[in-house]
Image (spheres, helix red, strand yellow):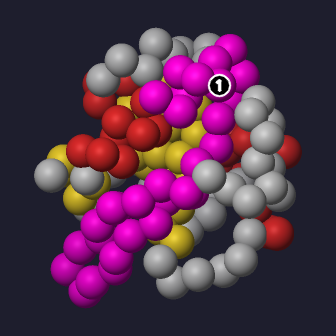
Amino acid sequence: MTIKRSVIDSILSYAKMAHPNESVLLLHGKLSKKTILIDEVVIPPLATHGQDFSEFPLSMLPSSLSMIGVAHSHPNGVLEPSIQDLNHFYGRVMVITAYPYESETDLALFDGKGNPVRYEII
Ligand SMILES: [Zn+2]
């Protein structure tokens, strides 16, 4: 799993902007046999700032091969997926960023079981 630095920065600044509400961003990128590269974030077409991730209509998203997963923020500062998050898992990976959204230490990737995913920033 590889993430572009610009994607990390976008997730952090978008989360700051939405705080104290949750923010949701779609992760786009490239899948290969060996790895996944996340190289773009997209504001969801139906998004409004402050929409709860758990209420976000993932089923209404256009399905796309380039859609790797979803990033959302935790204004409460907890850097772990909730049960609801795991029930709403979409794609290959879930990115969570927790308040104060200052750097990549306030951000983590998880698989569909809630296990942390190691990644590299390029
Ligand atoms: Zn969450």
Query: Is 38 above or below relative to 80?
Result: below
Residue at screen point 46% across, 38% down: 11
User: Does the Cβ of the disc 1 residue fall within 8 Å of ligand 1?
Assistant: no
Q: Amino acid at mark 1?
A: Ala
Q: Is residue 81 left or right of residue 21?
A: left
Q: Position of residue 43 (x, y in %)?
A: 62, 52
Q: Is residue 88 left or right of residue 102?
A: right
The answer to whether residue 31 shows anywhere in this view is: yes
Q: Relative to the observer, which residue lies in front, 29 or 45?
A: 45
Q: Residues within 10 Å of mark 1 (few under 14, many from 20)?
A: some
Q: Relative to the observer, which residue lies in front, 97 or 85?
A: 97
Q: Position of residue 79 (x, y in %)?
A: 47, 26
Q: Is residue 83 left or right of residue 46?
A: left
Q: Position of residue 111 (x, y in %)?
A: 45, 56
Q: Which residues are magenta?
A: 13-42
Q: Check if residue 30 falls in the magenta segment.
A: yes
Query: Is 25 above or below relative to 66?
Result: above
Using the rendered view, name the quadrant where residue 64 is placed: bottom right
The answer to whether residue 78 shows anywhere in this view is: no
Residue under label 1: 18
Give the SS element for disc 1: helix
Q: Position of residue 67 (x, y in %)?
A: 52, 72
Q: Check if residue 109 falls in the magenta segment.
A: no
Q: Is residue 31 left or right of residue 111?
A: left
Q: Quadrant of the N terminus?
A: bottom left
Residue at screen point 15% across, 52% down: 122
Residue at screen point 55% across, 57% down: 42
| Number of marks | 1
Query: Is 116 above or below relative to 88?
Result: above
Residue at screen point 53% across, 46% down: 71
